[in-house]
Image: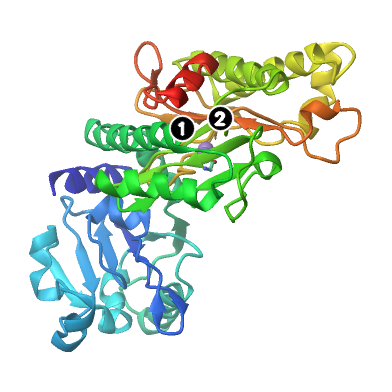
Amino acid sequence: MKEYLERRKKLISKMPKNSLAIIFGSNSLIRNGDVEFPFRQNSDFFYLTGFEEPNAVAIIESDDSGEFTIFCQDKDPSKEQWEGNRMGPKNCKNIGAKEGFSIEVFSEEISNFLINKERIYYQKDLNNSLEDIVNKNIAMLKKTTSRSNNFVPEEIHSIDSLLHEIRLLKTKEEIKIIRKACEISSAAHIRAMKNVYPEMYEYQLEAEYVHEFMKNGAKACAYPSIVGGGKNACILHYNENKDQLLDGDLVLVDAGCEFKGYASDITRTFPINGKFSKAQEAVYEIVLEANKECIKTVRKNFTPNDTEKKAVEIITQGLLDLNILNGEIKELIERKAYHDFYMHRVGHWMGMDVHDVGSYGLNGNWRKYLPGMITTIEPGIYFKQDLKNVPKEFLNIGIRIEDDVLVTDGDPEVLTSSVPKDLKKVESIMRS
Ligand code: GLY
Ligand code: MN
Ligand code: MN
């Protein structure tokens, strides 16, 4: 609970006096019929409260010492018989809240928090019906407070820039959890390398990941696993995972577990029969070089754009060496000649959300890496079937190598370093 209190204190320290933060949790979502998707709490809400039930709202006041008020589901023995235990407003002290209300009275009670506050912060466009209730209450209070010495918030801000700056810098406790998520996902990639075989189905290989995740305490994937054999590797977010893996093809697997609310995000590309062909090897070595060189830039005084430039430079040079591009490197980079083969960016912040929050720029400039930030490094090269001027042996090859990297005071720390990526090491682990 202390970690959540510290986070709320950090948020309060950024809120001007007499402000109110209203943080919405997630609602349950119907999958089909009366079956719900597994519930996943909203990351901002979880970050500040640690509370995992649906249909809740947290109220944080700038003049408080880090305490908060919770609106949550009522106790309901008959529902709890089916759905499991609910905390209930009366037990709000269990999560460090000073006061608890039923979510059913949110629309009646919220005006008591809004009145005489100068500004409010909330997550815009997250929960339209609760946002509506807040806005209607402000409008109603405007009428009832006119010609009185009470007032209502004039400023309504998105909380994102305040809260997400805090989330971007991970604490020691968070890094410990992410490290563990990365360890579990690394073990899953090694398991898959050892167990893949020609004619296996992509979803069967996916099962190896799910097995390893759950066996090690990670009950969910951080995102839908991408298991793309052969040409499917060229579809960036392919996750149907329905085809057979063929002898002689590569398989690209982008899979990471979520552990205690934190993501990991790893991609490895390996030969289904255990041995890279010459053409596969040539492309793999370019992507691997880009991965390694980009990781070296994840340090203080560098920016995500420095990392991107490094990826573009190495991939463009690699495509020149393969005679897939021709010309002068500077001019090829300027006109983005690599874009048909490398069309995403080289990294993104990672944390509670796989594509985590936090801006990439500050005041119109790229921001510098700081210790505690975690970024992925994931260069790739994809030769789609229909590309012109690409020798036939390269068509349908898609390769991405993705690691999760922590910025430190010194050298970058690769949190996913236990999964092999050097070509000979990949082949060797596949034989073992
Ligand atoms: N797993 C999604 C991504 O790498 O961005
Ligand atoms: Mn990924
Ligand atoms: Mn990624």
What residue is disc 2 on? Answer: 270
- Residue 362 placement, left or right of 396: left
State which quarter of the image contains the C terminus. Answer: top left
The x, y position of residue 297, in whole percent, is 52, 15
> Between 432 and 91, which is closer to the camera in this rendering?
432
The x, y position of residue 387, in whole percent, is 86, 36
- Residue 174 placement, left or right of 418: left
Say above or below: 6 vs 24: above
Label 2 CB less than 8 angstroms from ligand 2: no
Q: Is residue 371 visible?
A: yes
> Between 84 and 304, which is closer to the camera in this rendering?
84
Say above or below: 394 vs 85: above
Kindly indicate the quadrant of the structure image that contains residue 372: top left
- Residue 263 placement, left or right of 312: left
Which three-letter amino acid code belongs to the residue tagged 2?
A: Phe
Say above or below: 62 vs 328: below
Q: Secondary structure at mark 2?
A: strand
Alpha-carbon span between mark 1 and mark 2: 7 Å
The x, y position of residue 370, in whole percent, is 40, 23
Q: Secondary structure at mark 1?
A: helix
Query: First in sequence: mark 1 or mark 2?
Result: 1
Give the number of the disc on residue 193: 1
- Residue 245 placement, left or right of 30: right
| Residue at image coords 61%, 18% | 290
> Between 34 and 355, which is closer to the camera in this rendering?
34
Q: Is residue 62 visible?
A: no
Q: Residues within 10 Å of mark 2 (few under 14, many from 20)?
A: many
> Between 12 and 56, which is closer to the camera in this rendering?
56
Do callouts 1 and 2 mark residues in contact (Cβ within 8 Å)?
yes
Colouring of the image: rainbow
